[in-house]
Image (spheres, rainbow, N blue to C red):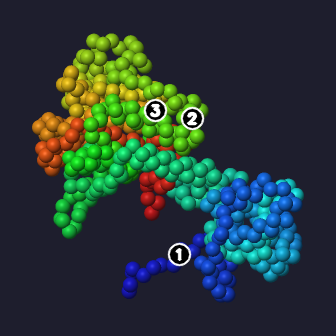
Amino acid sequence: MNTDAPHPPATDDSHLIAERRAKLSALREVGPAFPNDFKPAHQAMSLQALHGGDEPDALEAADVRVRVAGRMMLKRVMGKASFATLQDGTGRIQIHVSNDVTGEEAHAAFKHYDLGDWIGCEGVLFKTRTGELTIRAEQVRLLVKSLRPLPDKFHGLEDVETRYRQRYVDLIVTPESRERFALRSKAIAALRNEMLAAGFMEVETPMLHPIPGGAAAKPFTTHHNALDQQMYLRIAPELYLKRLLVGGFERVFEINRNFRNEGLSPRHNPEFTMMEFYAAWWTYRDQMDFTEALIRNTAQLTCGTAVLTHQGRTLDLSAPFARLTLTQAIQKHAPDYTDAQLADDGFLRGELRRLDADHAPHKLKGMGLGALQLALFEEVAEHLLWEPTFIVDYPVEVSPLARAADADANTTERFELFITGREIANGFSELNDPEDQAARFQSQVQAKEAGDDEAMYFDADYVRALEYGMPPAGGCGIGIDRLVMLLTDAPSIRDVILFPALRFEG
């Protein structure tokens, strides 16, 4: 017995679905049930834009002939005439089906069409008495039979998880979702165009890595059968992009998918999109200036303004972004901490325990002063950074790939950009000293051996690349999903990812 043969779809007990399956069976008996010979020549939005303002008499005289296709979202049957609303990829338009113009047989067949069916319509534009642009249907055809009824038009798809799990239904019935993802596409196009205009070259780097690197994160693991070796899904493209700087490309960027085997939250999905970019001869301050302008311009190009509303609060991307160190940010939002306390690792450990911060005792024990300051910042200040703020000059301890500052070997030339309390971007002057990089990798290995499962591996090939010489450079990564959350006023990262990670239904 061939167990690989396709199985027929399971019978659905729903009365409505049973009725629709019966209609489909009848269609199969008379010809192709899913024809593919209809070619729409027009779209709803363009017709509305061109003729929505026409006077009724002028529109009738113009005899504008159109051919459209769309999903039937509304239907109103009235004896010898009927109205329906079709939705295509751009918007909606009304059609008028009648015995007189469409024909009695075609109109009778139309009355048996269901909401959700795909309809092809040819006819002439006119205005109804209420002024609605409508197609007087001369021909109407059923193109695709929908077997499942759409959600109730008044309530839509109310269950949030169902909206994420069945995004295809969400997009049909929720205009806001369609608009949000259209805006996402527009934002990514704006980012790409800005990068190309600044002289960056778009590249592609591997998603399967023999050694995970470029970020502090827990990777997904897999096995490559032909090579007989463990592989990792990319957590960041950074080390490959910097290899290209070694090779002589001076400005590169990648809009990339990353994978991190970590938790789910309103701002975390295990699969997400970033844009990383690297420029030779730039410092982290050059990158800050460029990143600020890039985000401001992207908002302007995408939304038409750099002053947004996010979750009921004004978000002004047009004003200069603030720049603070970790300790300055802590003291701005928790002014009771003194300089001496923030420089005392014993005090910081006690304070983190008092705050019941989510740090295991062994992790606290292994943290140096820089990591402790960062942990306190995350507890008391990070979530309060609503307006765009660059946190600058991170400790070396928490920045294994960033260049140390010439004036202070314990500090790196690094920034993170926070907006609405979320990290949006991370950048720094790149470490191009191969011996320093090797030493930092070694300290990461020791941290991993001590129990830090997010610590980096030692990447000998990357060190070898640096030994050939990488020019001074600045790099940055921008979280595309989080940026789109800002631009579309979305409360959760799942609202801006078409198919977010969910527990499998089976």
**Which disc number belongs to residue 419?**
3
Ranked by sequence position, the earlier of labels 3 and 1 is 1
Q: Is residue 375 visible?
A: no
* Corner quadrant of residue 443: top left
Q: Residue at x 39, y 28 (%)?
A: 390
In front of the other: 121 or 346: 121
Q: CA distance from mark 2 to mark 3?
A: 12 Å
Question: Dot 2 surroundings within 10 Å: few (below 14), some, or many (20 or more)?
Answer: many
Q: Residue at x 21, y 50 (%)?
A: 247
Q: Secondary structure at mark 3?
A: strand
Q: Secondary structure at mark 1?
A: loop
Instruction: Specify the amino acid type for callout 3.
Output: Ile
Ranked by sequence position, the earlier of labels 2 and 1 is 1
The percent position of residue 211, horizontal first and vertical second, equals 21, 51
The percent position of residue 506, horizontal first and vertical second, equals 45, 63
* Corner quadrant of residue 365: top left
Q: CA distance from mark 3 to mark 1?
A: 47 Å
Asked if 182 appears above or below 423 in the picture, the reply is below
Instruction: Specify the amino acid type for callout 2.
Output: Leu
**Which disc number belongs to residue 308?**
2
**Which disc number belongs to residue 9?**
1
Instruction: Specify the amino acid type for callout 1.
Output: Pro
Q: CA distance from mark 2 to mark 1?
A: 47 Å
